[in-house]
Every structure is written in structure tokens, then in C-alpha cells.
Image (cartoon, grey):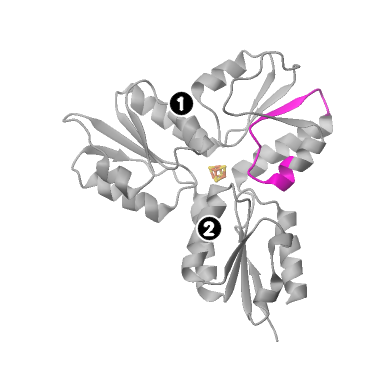
Amino acid sequence: MDREVIVAESAGFCFGVRRAVDYVYDCVQKKEGPIYTYGPIIHNEVVTEELEKEGVKILDPTKAIPEHLPIGTLIIRSHGVTKKRYEEMLISGHELSDMTCPFVKKIHTIVEEHSKQKETIIIIGNKEHPEVIGICGWCHEGRHEVIGSKEEAEKFVAGANEKICIVSQTTYNYKKFQELVEIIYKKGYDISVINTICSATKDRQAEALSLAKSMEAMIVIGSRASSNTQKLYEICKKECANTYYIQTIDDLDVTKMSKIHSVGITAGASTPNKLIEEVQTNVRNEL
Ligand code: SF4
């Protein structure tokens, strides 16, 4: 039986992640003293384990830089950090390499400027995500809130003259963002909405949706810890019941697809190309 296997063009590393990961590999090649990443450089254990074997140390992103850490290169990942942490790093004595994605940096600037104008900042996103924690840390004193569900949006109450600025986590689902903004908007407050969802995410989600509509099975590759991969999985699963979420080829039971004529493959922003190619090759050969 002839089977079609299509890999989404937008599958895998986005610009911001590629920039950060390539930078760490460059540092490894130069081997100029210890290299530290503040948290895993990406949500992908295969890559981080490979880097750890090369001597790259991952620092705990919930804590300050340890005081007696041998001086080396300190790398901020694409998620960014809070302003407080950034300033601590600048005076830590380490060589600081800021690989915060420029799209995330833009949100830091927006929330900093708007909160300086005494506006309330609403960040639509997941409050536990490091990018969102970082964004919160660029809001000046005053009110800022993270909203990630309909219930939270419905509960939100603002004062009479409160001005509100709404931004989003870059990897948030666009439809969900619109839904939550709509709920807040209907309350009649003075609101400015700045859509800060990254187009890499939108494009990847749109392509996954259209593939899932036309394929009999979908494979979504990425770490369980990656929120953008989880969202891709949700989108595909809604359209295509035979959607499989895998981290590596070992998680895929190809026998489940023996009667499938067409398979679409997509992958989260932190999935390396070589993993995607490996899955593609296996699916083509095994089916
Ligand atoms: S998803 Fe977009 S904002 Fe996030 S790191 Fe990638 S390019 Fe940057």
C-alpha cells in the first residue's frame, strides 16, 4: 500500500531557539572556560544531555547565581529572565551572553514602558512558564496579572480609572488568546491589546492544523515539558484522533499505524532536526 508521509515545513527549532542553541554549541567549540546556561537552553532532554556531556552546566533558574561559581560564560536562554536577575548577572563577574529571543525582549520593553505609565499589565499565558515569569519581572511596581483560563479572565476586575495593557506569552494559542481578551474586553475597561504571539508559533500551529485535517494520523515530536509542543498536540488531536505525542522514535509504536494511508509529522520549537529526520525515516521505512 502506498502511504504519504508529510513533514510540516515549520516543524522544529524556531529562530529564537536556534540562535540560542547554536550559540551554546559555538561556545563549546571555543572551549574558553566554564559554560553555564541559566536553566536548560531548550526543553529537550536529548540536546541538553548532549551539551552536559560537553561540560555545559545548567544552573537552577529559580535561584540566584551561586556565589562561588568558577568564572565563565553565563548564557541566558531564549525565554529571558526577570530584570532583577538580569542586573544580578551583569555584576556577577561572569561574561554574560544574553540569548533572550528578540521577540521576548520586545515584550519586556512593552510591559516596562506601559507599567511605568501606571497601566495594569495583563499577561495572557501560563504563570509557571519561565518566559512569563521573566516578563512579570519587567513590570514596574503596580499591578500585573497573569491570566491563563476563562475563569481567571471572568474574575478579573479593574478600578474606575485603571488603564490596562494586555500582552501574551509568545507561544500561546492564538484562538485562546482571542477568547480570553474578548472576555476582559466585554467588561468595558480602557484596554490596549498588543498581540505578542510569535508568528513562528502561529505558523507552526496553522500548518499543524491543516495537516491534521487532511492526514489519517499525526505525529507530534517534542519534550513533554515543552508547552508549545503540548499545544501542537492539542490542536492536532482535535482534528485527528490518531495523533501521537512522542519525544523520540522509541516512543512510537508503528504497528498502530499499519492500516494508515497518510501520516503528517510536526514538532515543537525545541525539537532538533535530526530527531524529526529520524522519525520521518522510520515512519517511511516501517510503514
Ligand atoms: S517561539 Fe518565537 S518568540 Fe519564542 S523563542 Fe521562538 S522565535 Fe522567539
* Amino acid type indicated by mark 1: Gly
Q: Position of residue 214 (x, y in %)?
A: 53, 75
Q: CA distance from mark 1 to mark 2?
A: 28 Å
Please state which of residues 52 and 173 is positioned toward the viewer in this rendering. 52
Quadrant in which ligand 1 is drawn: top right
Q: Quadrant of the N terminus?
A: bottom right
* Amino acid type indicated by mark 2: Leu
Q: Position of residue 113 (x, y in %)?
A: 38, 26
Q: Position of residue 117 (x, y in %)?
A: 31, 23
Residue numbers of the magenta segment: 31-48
Name the residue located 32 percent from the left edge and 27 percent from the top edge: 143
Name the residue located 75 percent from the left edge and 27 percent from the top edge: 35
The residue singled out by tag 1 in the image is: 137
Q: Secondary structure at mark 2?
A: helix
Q: Position of residue 96 (x, y in %)?
A: 66, 22
Q: Is residue 261 above or below residue 202?
A: below
